[in-house]
Amino acid sequence: MTKSLGPAARPGHINPTVVEVEGGFLNAMGLPNPGVEGYLEELRELKHWGVPVVASFFASTVEEFQSGAKALCGAGADALELNLSCPNVGGEPGMCAADVISVERVTAAVKQVAKSPVFVKLSPNVTDIVGIAVAAENGGADAITAVNTLKAMVIDADFRRPVLANVTGGLSGPALKPVALRCVWEIAEAVKVPIIGCGGVSNWRDAVEYMLAGATAVEIGTGVMYEGLEVYGKVNEGIAGYLRENGFGSVKEIVGLAHRK
Ligand code: RRO
């Protein structure tokens, strides 16, 4: 999974952009990235590694979303993740994950041109995430990623100022997990497309909990800050052990299992 790419290169916000808090991290990176065109060479190189590459991207207009999708698929992205949900974009329409009409329209427009599956990443910073998930599904999303970070802030009592230069940022890590898990649970009761759980996964038990709530896969970001890159292998091995010890033949058998009446 790439860092989110946009139509043009962006330096991101000025520092401080990341601060550790109890139970996680707050970031206000401000979407720093080399731009879709500036990233294509690296994407082509990643293809030589023999692992699937998901290109995360954002844009401000439907046309930009479509041209980003075409370029990223053309360079070999195995899937696209529409980041409709960055909490750090001020007045720009980057937070279109708050609006059902925009979510359905952008998803459908990208699906028209994308040659690879399209995931839609949603925000927990909304009143009704289920309505938004249904809009993504109606737009043709192949999967829903739930969720991006939770809008939050930190104030330093000695300096009597907000810590992040952007004032607010997105909370990730273990503190986000119960919120994200609830989002996955609610979405699973409303849509048929696969859900990718995201938020505070740092060990196999977290991943299993997401699957029991209805996720068919998980994403791990902040977990790397705590556990290093080994986290991915450890989580995979841990899930395999859990399945073995509990008599399951495949992860498919535990997806959504906690919903049983
Ligand atoms: O770059 C960011 O500030 C950022 C992004 Br694009 C995002 O999707 N989520 C987040 O917490 N930060």
Image (cartoon, helix red, strand yellow):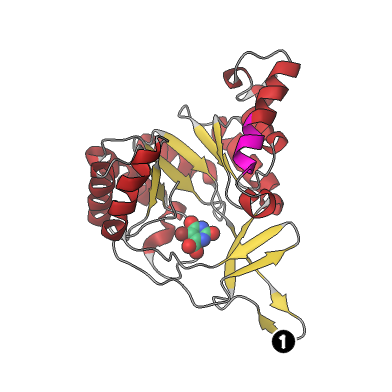
Asked whether residue 112 is drawn in magenta, I would say no
Count of marks, rendered view: 1
Identify the residue at image location x=66%, y=53%. 173
Where is residue 208, by image quadrant? top right
Q: Locate residue 23 relative to residue 4 in the image: left or right.
A: right
Q: Amino acid at mark 1?
A: Phe
Seen from the viewer's position, the closer of residues 53 and 125 is: 53
User: Could you say where residue 217 lies in the image, as x and y percent from the top left?
Assistant: 54, 33
Q: In this rendering, does residue 246 appear at all? A: yes
Q: Which residue is mark 1?
A: 159
Where is residue 114, by image quadrant? top left
Q: In this rendering, does residue 151 appear at all? A: no
**In the depicted structure, whether residue 170 falls above or below residue 122:** below
Identify the residue at image location x=37%, y=69%. 10
Rate crowding at label 1 as few (under 14), some (14 to 19) or many (20 or more) other CA atoms within 10 Å: few
Q: Which residues are magenta?
A: 230-236
User: Could you say where residue 109 lies in the image, as x and y percent from the top left?
Assistant: 26, 44
